[in-house]
Structures are given as structure tokens and as C-alpha cells.
Image (cartoon, coloured by chain):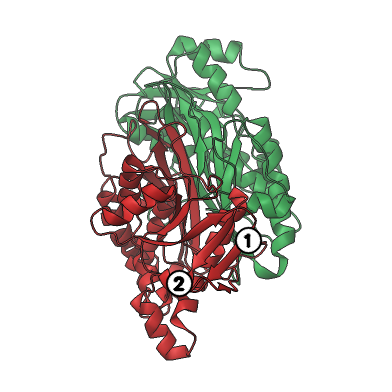
Chain colours: A green, B red
Amino acid sequence: MEAHFVDWLLGRIPADPRLEVPPGDDAAVLRPPPLRRTVIAVDMLTDGVDFLLASDEATPERIGHKALAVNLSDLAAMAARPEAAVVAVALPRERAAEIGRGLWTGIEPLAAAHGVTLAGGDTNTWDGPLVISVTVIGSVLPGAAWRRDGARPGDLLVLTGPCGGSLLGRHLDVRPRCREAIEIADRFTVHAAIDISDGLSLDLARLMRASATRGEIELHRVPIHDDARRRAAIDGIPALDHALADGEDFELLLAMPADDARDLVADPPAGLAPAIIGTVTQGAGICGRAADGTPLPLEAKGWMHDGDE
Amino acid sequence: MEAHFVDWLLGRIPADPRLEVPPGDDAAVLRPPPLRRTVIAVDMLTDGVDFLLASDEATPERIGHKALAVNLSDLAAMAARPEAAVVAVALPRERAAEIGRGLWTGIEPLAAAHGVTLAGGDTNTWDGPLVISVTVIGSVLPGAAWRRDGARPGDLLVLTGPCGGSLLGRHLDVRPRCREAIEIADRFTVHAAIDISDGLSLDLARLMRASATRGEIELHRVPIHDDARRRAAIDGIPALDHALADGEDFELLLAMPADDARDLVADPPAGLAPAIIGTVTQGAGICGRAADGTPLPLEAKGWMHDGDE
């Protein structure tokens, strides 16, 4: 590892009291917070799949922001506190310095806002398209990490915000729900959680599969983002379908005891508008319900990675 | 993060008692060893730069091995104990499954040999060339990490093994010196350390710059790998020059008090053939010396990353 990504782009090495050795050594040494578990997540974004560098929309700055933000969202889904990150990039040779600087401009303020130590990285240039891989380290008290496998029949399903239409541009401006998750974990009981990266219905199905439970969604209660309505106006697909399947929303889906769910919705963390959208029952799979209780089909749809079940 | 790289390729999820939540959750939760610092390093390897997938030599298995091994070498350079790793890959779409399986075949035994928990990863497919980014987590006692900035005038410079010619194929079969480093740290005083990734002379220059000292190398004492001699026979460049500048050797260069250096060479860890190759003095930069003490020019040469000084 080198700290090139930092050194080279800024001509300086940032000092951080959580680093025991200077950046630029072979590895970074962090002082882990005592008595806490280490949480680790990695996400790699590639040009042409996660963004289009050739588009006006995907500036290097927004790509850098997104690369760190999606990882922070994984920590939020565990109610883990962000601690540190390392960044590895493969930069297209011709625009390496410009793109690298832009990435950094997107990463640095988000890291600062979440108390993330940028501990180092690895900067490569090559003849291929832009690739950025961020690894984040978080911490959580023993046994306190939210998991996917804890939902119980009788839990209510809470979504922390509206979904759908993120591809209109919002997917590049991910607001990871780290602070909100930690506040919710402090104040309420949460049995299971997942972040909505690939699509509400698909991520719900994953949560239910991990928990060996069934998810019933009251479809009229799903909060629909304005972007989903905009996309519906463009492509004629109902806004609800966009909310259920578009993905890259990075809201959290929580399975909570009914009282906790109601209390959370009544008095949410600042800036959050959570909604109760359904119920966990015995069984498997997912289904929808209309306002009058009529069962409606609900397919697990969203962004399928190659090899996904 | 998904555990796809594990799930998908093997159709099973490995159990590891150091993982607090099942692989496949949004992030992995590790139990860090108590009272130790966390060490983190990342290295990204790209097709065409770090290996040539189109060659017969660079099988996916050897590439997977190398990707983890170079990171473990960074931990060795800090005398840190390997703990966990996450793996992010961008696989060329046409051969994704075959390449992914090959990578895994190279990664898994090396991880097992070094006690590394494979905590998860992120598997992408795309239309670009193969990219693999590995992040490793290690641990070390507070203040015990070897650093680059601790060399002192009077120290001897010890190289843990012969260098040069790794591009003949050895660079794909990196043997990270983790166990040896930990044994050396247990038995001897080491003031500063670096692994020889970019070239002995260049990495020496970095070690000296970080320590604000000067390195004098007795050139006739530099252990030269047989591969360096083979390359010399091919290209007519002296084998010593290959040993000084080729890089990707992944031996360790240590600055040690004279008595410790001599004791290490007299009684090294099993399988290691360390050699004293020079002295740390006051001043800056690096230089060579002939067997009779005559000063000889020594240039810091090796693999320069874009943006390197």
C-alpha cells in the first residue's frame, strides 16, 4: 500500500491522531476503539456499470462521493460507527491526475462528515476504464451489529425514506444513513436490517430469506420518491414499480418490534421520514397487500448481480 | 458488500469463528484480538500492468495468490499478524466464472496458511479487463509495528533474501514473509523496515528518506537471485543491476542495531537466508561501496508509480 492517493493529489500528508504511523508506510496502523468489534465492508465501482464517466452527470467528484457513500451505507445497515477507509483506484492514464483529484474532492468531505480516517490507498494508472474500490472499517459493540437474519414474525417493516428513480441522478449523491442508524440503535430495538442498494423488493426478499420469515408489504404505504414519479412520467412504468425495483436508494429497511416501529415513526431522528410499510409473518418469500387487505403479487425485482440467486 | 465471491464460486459459505455475523450480510463483523492495534493495507492489481492474463504464465490462480500475497507482504513489513481480508474483483464478462474460480483457488490456501479470515468481498462483472483489489487487516501490539522512519545511524541493513529477476515468473508466486517477520520482531530489535516491492535501491531510498538517514550498500554483499542471473544472460544487463532495480521481490529490508543484525544472520528463522548488505549513516540518500571501500554510484531505480517522487 502507498498513501499516493493522498500524497500525490494534495502534495501533503494529512495528519490524523488515530493513525499510529505516518501515512505512506507499508500499511496504516489504527487505534481501534476499545471493547468494540471491527466491521469491514468493501465495494468496487466500475465505469460503465456503476457510473458513466463519459456522461456529464458522473463527475469524478460525484463518483468519489458515491464510492465511499455506498460503503458507509453498508456500515449503516449494521448500525456500525464509521472509523476508517482505504481507497484503491485504477485511473485511465490520459486523465489520471484530473480524475484522481476529482475523486478526492468527493471523498474527503464525506469522510470528514462521518469521522472517517482516510488511512491510505493504492493509486494505479492503466489503459482501462476507471475503477474505484473502497474498503471501510467501522466499529460496533459486541452483539450489537444489526444483521439480516434476526427478523421475527410480528415485527413491523420500517423504511427510512422514499425509494425509486435514483438513476435520474440521485444514485450519485448517496446520503448514507450512518448517524440515523446509530441513533435508532441507541433508542430502539431493531431485529434485522438491510440497506436498499439493489431494489426494495429484492432487498426485502433477501432480508426475509436470511431470517427465514415472510414479508408482507402494504403497497399503498411504500413511500415513493419524486424521482420515481418523474421516471414514471418518462417511461410509463408505474412509480410504485420504480420504488420497488430501481435500487440505489440507500435507505434502510428495518424489522422492528411493533411498539418500537411506531415510536420510531412518531419521533424519528432529525431529517428522517420513516414509514411502516408492512409486517413480518411466518413463512417464506414476500407478498403485497392492497389498502383493503387484498393480496397482491410482489416479485423480488431489482439489480441482480451475476451469480445472484 | 456481498459475500458473492465466496458464495457464488463455491456454493457454500465458509464458517469462521472470528466472524460474528454470517458472511453475506452487508458487512462482516470481526472480533479483533484484544489490546492490539489494527493494521490495514490495500493493493489493487490490474491486467496489463501487474500481470498479463493473456499470457500462459498468469493463470487466474497465480493472480489470486499474488493479489493476497502482496498485501500480506505489506503486513510483514510492519511485523503485523494477518487477521482478515476482503476481496473486490471486476471480472471480464465472458470468462467471469472461470476466472473467479481460479482467483479463489489461488487465494484460499494462502489465506488458510496465514490464518486469514476471508471476511467477504464484492464481485463485479464488466466489459473491461480483470481487476482485483484486496484489503488485509492485521494486528500488532501498540507501538510494536515496524515503520519506515525509525532507522538510526550505526544500524546495519539486513535483506531477508536474494533479489532480482522476479519478472521471469517469481513475481506471481510471492512468498510473503509474515511468519518470519513476526519471529524476527519477537527475537530482535528492528528500527525500521520496508518490503522490496518496487526495487531494492528504490525501496532503500524510501526507507532512508522516511528515517532522514543515508544508506550505504556494500554492493558485493547484495544477495543476487538466480533469476537475476538468468535475466542478465538474456538482456546483457548485469545481474546486480537486476537485483537492485527489478522489484517484486517481496523480501524485507531491515535497519537493525549491529548486534541484532549479526545475531539474526547467525541464527535466522527457518527457511530464511538473511544477509547484511550495508550500513545506515548520517546524511541523506543512498550510495554504494566496493569490497575495498571505494564509493560507487547507486541510483534509486525501480518501479515508479505515476506521481512518485
Which of the two residues, A76 or A193, is positioned nearer the viewer here? A76
Within the image, what quadrant is residue A132 found in?
bottom right
Q: Residues within 10 Å of mark 2 (few under 14, many from 20)?
A: many
Outermost residue toward the left in this view: B270
- Whether residue A88 appears in this view of the structure is no
C-alpha span from label 2 to label 1: 31 Å
Which residue does the image show at 64% across and 22% down from the upper left? Answer: A272
Looking at the rendered structure, the secondary structure element under dot 1 is strand
Image height check: is A128 above or below A170? below
Q: Is residue B307 above or below residue B219?
A: above
Check residue B285 in the rendering and tell me which mark sits there, or answer none.
Answer: 1
* Placement of A44 over or under A298, stated as above or below: below
Secondary-structure class at tag 2 = loop
Residue type at mark 1?
Gly
* Residue shown at the point (67%, 61%) measured from the top left: B309
Label at residue A132: none
Residue where numbered disc 2 is placed: B51
